[in-house]
Structures are given as C-alpha cells and as structure tokens.
Image: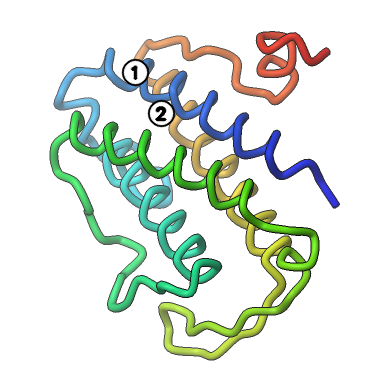
C-alpha cells in the first residue's frame, strides 16, 4: 500500500501553499475564465473541495447527494479556504482511522451520474490525490498566467520541508 497518511499530509501542505498564492490574486483574476477545465481559479478550487467531499463521503458511508461537479460550494474565498482547511484535517483523520482491512474492503456507492459502482477505498484515495494534483496543476498555471510565482508543489519539496528527504 502507498503511504496514505503521508499523502494526506502532503495534500494539506500543498493546499496551504496554493491558497496562500491564490490570496495574492485580484478579485477579477480569481474569477476570470482562464481556459482551464472549470474556467477560473475560483471554480477549480470549489470543484476540488466538492470532489474530495464526494469521495470521502463515500468511504465514510455518508455520500453527498445531488451534487454536480460544477457546483460552487462557497462564493467567498475566505469561506472556501476555511472549508478546504477543515476538509484536509478531516481527510487526515479519515485515513488515520482506516485499517489495512478497511482500505481493501470494497464499498458500493452511486456516481454523480447515477451509476452504481464498487471500489476499494485505497483506489478511491489514490483517485482523490491524483485528482487534486491534476487540478492544482491547473491552478498553478493560472497563477503563473497572472504573474504570481507559486511555491513549488512537487512532493519532494514537501519532503524536504518536512525533513523526510
């Protein structure tokens, strides 16, 4: 198994850095359609939070119902940031509470399209972390387009910062 507690900690670390950089954006740049999959930094960050809640809710057995992948959960940046911080803590706690057996015990859930699926939690978590990396890369690019140089967010920078490598 991959080191999911480390990945959850990295996820929290990198989200802090991304949000610090996003806080430097003007309101117009924060909401402007920059051509990313969800358009703006604002919409992309909302999407990431929504999808984390979807996946984690499925693992917990408390699925988020009626959500659309384009939903804006928080229109205000400060509220979105606070919700992101809380979600990152909740993800760390979720993973800490999963035994090896729980990580490999399939769960059944319904996708946002209404399709029933059965998946092991380790694969759901791998998907969650990969999804975060994918869209944070888009945010990183949008920040760069706006003249902001974000912190390097590769996992090695986290490892060096935490004294792990």
- The residue wearing badge 2 is 142
Badge 2 marks a residue whose secondary structure is: helix
The quadrant in which the C terminus is found is top right
Residue 120 appears in which quarter of the rendering? bottom right
Q: Position of residue 25 (x, y in %)?
A: 26, 18
Q: Position of residue 140 (x, y in %)?
A: 48, 26
Q: Is residue 164 left or right of residue 130?
A: right
Q: Residue at x 69, y 14 (%)?
A: 157
Res. 146 mark: 1
Q: Position of residue 116 (x, y in %)?
A: 54, 90
Could you tell me if the residues under marks 2 and 1 are in contact, i.e. CB atoms within 8 Å?
yes
Pick the front one: 42 or 157: 157
Pick the front one: 114 or 44: 114
Vertical comparison of 58 with 159: above or below = below
Q: Residue at x 68, y 76 (%)?
A: 119
Q: Is residue 78 left or right of residue 24?
A: left
Badge 1 marks a residue whose secondary structure is: loop
Vertical comparison of 10 with 86: above or below = above
Q: Is residue 51 left or right of residue 67?
A: right
Q: Residue at x 50, y 36 (%)?
A: 136
Between the C-alphas of marks 2 and 1, the distance is: 6 Å
Q: How many residues crowd around disc 1 within 10 Å: few (fewer than 14), some, or many (20 or more)?
A: some
Vertical comparison of 20 with 48: above or below = above
Pick the front one: 34 or 17: 17
């Amino acid at each position: 198994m991959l080191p999911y507690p480390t990945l959850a900690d990295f996820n929290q670390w990198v989200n802090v850095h991304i949000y610090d950089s996003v806080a430097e954006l003007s309101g117009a740049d924060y909401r402007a359609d920059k051509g990313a999959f969800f358009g703006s930094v604002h919409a992309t960050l909302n999407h990431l939070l929504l999808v984390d809640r979807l996946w984690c809710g499925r693992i917990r057995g408390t699925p988020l119902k009626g959500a659309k992948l384009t939903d804006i959960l928080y229109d205000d940046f400060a509220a979105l940031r606070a919700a992101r911080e809380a979600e990152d803590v909740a993800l760390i706690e979720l993973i800490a509470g999963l035994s090896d057996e729980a990580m490999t015990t399939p769960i059944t859930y319904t996708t946002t399209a209404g399709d029933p699926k059965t998946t092991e939690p380790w694969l759901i978590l791998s998907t969650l972390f990969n999804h975060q990396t994918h869209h944070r890369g888009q945010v990183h690019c949008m920040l760069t387009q706006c003249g902001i140089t974000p912190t390097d967010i590769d996992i090695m920078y986290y490892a060096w910062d935490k004294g792990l490598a």
